Image (tube, helix red, strand yellow):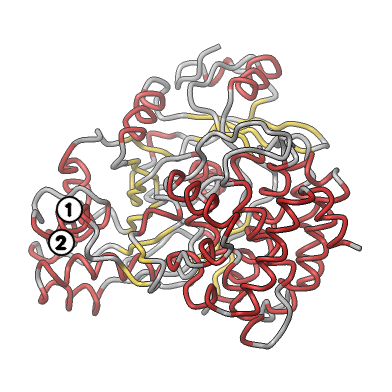
Amino acid sequence: MELSTETLPKLNGGIRVPAYDRRDVRAGILHVGMGNFHRAHQAVYLEDLLEQGGGRDWGILGAGVMPADGRMREGLAAQDFLYTVVEQSAAGTNARVIGAMTGFLAVEDGHGPILEAMADPDIRIVSLTVTEGGYFIDAATGRFDRTHPAIRRDIDQPESPGTVFGAIVAGLRARRAAGQKPFTVMSCDNVPHNGVVTRNAVLGVAREQDPDLADWIEANVAFPNGMVDRITPATTDRRRKVLADGFGLDDRVPVFCEPFRQWVLEDRFPAGRPALEEVGVQFVPDVTPYENMKIRILNGGHAIIAYSGGLLDLEFAHDAMAHPLVSGLLEKVERDEVIPVVPPVPDTSLDAYFTLVRERFSNPSVEDTIRRLCLDGSNRQPKFIVPSIVDRLAAGKSVDGLALVSALWCRYCFGTTDSGAVTEPNDPNWDHLVTMSKAARQDPSAWLGMEDVYGAAGRDPRLQAAFAAALKSVWQDGTAATLKRYLA
């Protein structure tokens, strides 16, 4: 059965459907980037609140700035902006239809519909998920890159923005001109200090367009930091078949995910916010400790199993966890090198958190692919692995395990696995990474010389020595033998 408002009452009884009247819900949040993660995370928390009788003026109005967003809009519009979230675990599979979306704006050059929506005083939060690499950060300096061509275009053409940050500046300009309160800007991306990063991007555009506007934004607009977590793999035809065969439902844009989810958020919303604390969101004065824990232990853990698993031709994360060498690498690097430099987290055991991470990685039902975990290493490594390297070097501690993780990433980017199978491009900077990997085979310092990834750490003799030894071993003896030697 196709999903729509009309078919909701007729769906398989095993599918949970909205129990509230969607006609009573109006948009209070404009969300840019309606990908799988947002729809399995933020939108589900809003759905929980609606189910409890709250949040009627906090519905989600979808928006996008990329061509893929247009295709997502078509799929959602065809089924009245309903979609299914399928939670998969060893204990079983649960399906739930989400109704928190009130609509999805047309995706147009210049983002006219987005700017019009931002002028609506009912929109009090503009949230976004534009991926880790979508914030125009110069990795060598860690600062917003004002020189990027897309940003320069937005600076020069403020009335016809191309990026989400140019659109936010234009929207805030209109709110200020109309004498309205500004909306809160809330990043939901897996980026360290995502609120600060978003603020820097918005102010970076505004400052060069209109210094007075930038001063107003700096004084009046909130950019709360948040830590988000839920493993949400790509939707495949095989997963769609799970929904069709198990529940008799035809959904054009379903989302599949693990049961676990977490959201830790700083409570800075001058224009108001939904009562998300009633549905499990944790509000804290400073999200930094939780963010460090998640990014270094969980996301860093994904990187640890990704490239070793990829080189050994493993397909899924749970396959990697079942492989004694890969799971052993995860255990040793995390406990010996990562967890010891993660600052304490209030009311949280890092050991218990890592145990939960291992269980989540081992979930066979999620079928999270190794290829997805290997994706976009050039943007993820500087955030997930390199900070632990920097802290250990500063403390005078060994980086042998983390250097091995970097060596495995370097070897993966050569473009073949240990068996000789070809690795298809898997990074926005793939051609450059392949070139650097080939150069590093003869001169390991070439890889560490990527300033946008390693910064000053790449010039540290201790990391250089450990990385060179690990890369030499991977090339001479292979991944399996290298892991055996490291674990011994």
Which residue is the site of mark 2?
Answer: 175
Q: Is residue 53 above or below residue 289?
A: above
Q: Residues within 10 Å of mark 1 (few under 14, many from 20)?
A: many
Depth check, front residue: 112 or 422: 422
Q: Amino acid at mark 1?
A: Ala
Q: Is residue 389 left or right of residue 46?
A: right
Q: Is residue 271 left or right of residue 42?
A: left
| Quarter of the figure that contains the C terminus | bottom right
Under circle 2, the secondary element is: helix
Residue at position x 19%, y 61% from top?
169
Q: Are marks 2 and 1 in contact (CB under 8 Å)?
A: yes
Q: Which mark is residue 119?
A: 1
Q: Is residue 50 in view?
A: no
Residue at position x 39%, y 50% from top?
130
| Quarter of the figure that contains the N terminus | top right
Under circle 1, the secondary element is: loop
Decide which of tag 2 and tag 1 comes sooner along the chain.
1
Q: Amino acid at mark 2?
A: Arg
Depth check, front residue: 354 or 13: 354
Q: Residue furthest bottom?
A: 395
Find residue 365 and report its horizontal and vertical position in percent. Answer: 75, 34
Residue at position x 16%, y 64% from top?
180
Q: Residue furthest right?
A: 488
Residue at position x 67%, y 88% from top?
395
Depth check, front residue: 313 or 60: 313
Report which quarter residue 462 is drawn in: bottom right
Q: Is residue 270 above or below residue 314?
A: below
Find residue 232 and report its horizontal and vertical position in percent. Answer: 60, 42
Q: Is residue 195 in view?
A: yes
Q: Is residue 36 above or below residue 479?
A: above
Q: Is residue 342 above or below residue 162?
A: below
3D distance between C-alphas at marks 2 and 1: 6 Å
